[in-house]
Image: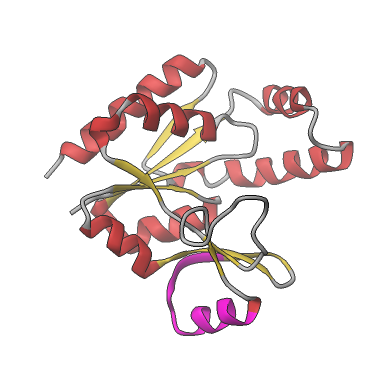
Amino acid sequence: MGKLIIFSAPSGSGKSTIVHRLMGEHPEFHLAFSISATSRPPRGTEQDGVDYFFLTPEDFRQRIARGEFLEYEEVYPGRFYGSLRRQVERQLEAGQNVIFDVDVAGGCRIRDIYGSRAMSIFVKPPSLKELERRLRSRHTDSEEQITQRLGKAAYELTFAPRFDHIVVNDDLQRAVEQTASLVAEFITRP
């Protein structure tokens, strides 16, 4: 039976980079991403059941009403994202250690549901000033989007104490090594 490893962080903290490095460098951890459900249409070559589970907004709402989600969020009216409980259980039963890359509220909810079978890691930027520098260096967001992301980051940082571990990403290699050590200890614990 697998375990759950939950990652949350403000946008630009380096969480996705850390997770991808962890998965690529440690096949012995038997890590697999949780496949999220969404009500948005597929993009490009995305496949149902591989990249996401694509649902209509109405189907998504019905599944919410039936309690089928561990966590979900309506990011825009009619645009939902969430983690299906049954899919996660299948992955755990297959012996996979399931990685979640979710918002802070979703991360806290999943941790509360699974208790000692889950470990939560908050990836923190060294400072808001450094986070702003990282967001600007991407050249992907407008000034308004950067301002929104920084405002959201300040809010998300207030959740950090609710996580099992905080990894400060001021040096990527050190952050990857620290995360790998935390995961190794957690998945080998009975």
Left or right of 112 in this view: 35? right
x and y, in percent, of residue 70 in the image: 43, 66
x and y, in percent, of residue 182 in the image: 30, 31
- Which residue occupies the foreground of this view, 51 or 74? 51
Q: Residue furthest front?
A: 45
The verdict on residue 138 being magenta is no
Left or right of 32 in this view: 136? right
At 50% from the left and 25% from the top, the residue drawn is: 168
Q: Quadrant of the C terminus?
A: top left
Q: Does residue 61 sit above or below 131 in this rendering? A: below
At 15% from the left and 40% from the top, the residue drawn is: 189
At 79% from the left and 33% from the top, the residue drawn is: 140
Q: What's the magenta region?
A: 58-72
Q: Does residue 189 sit above or below 42 in this rendering? A: above
Q: Quadrant of the N terminus?
A: bottom left
x and y, in percent, of residue 126 in the image: 59, 23
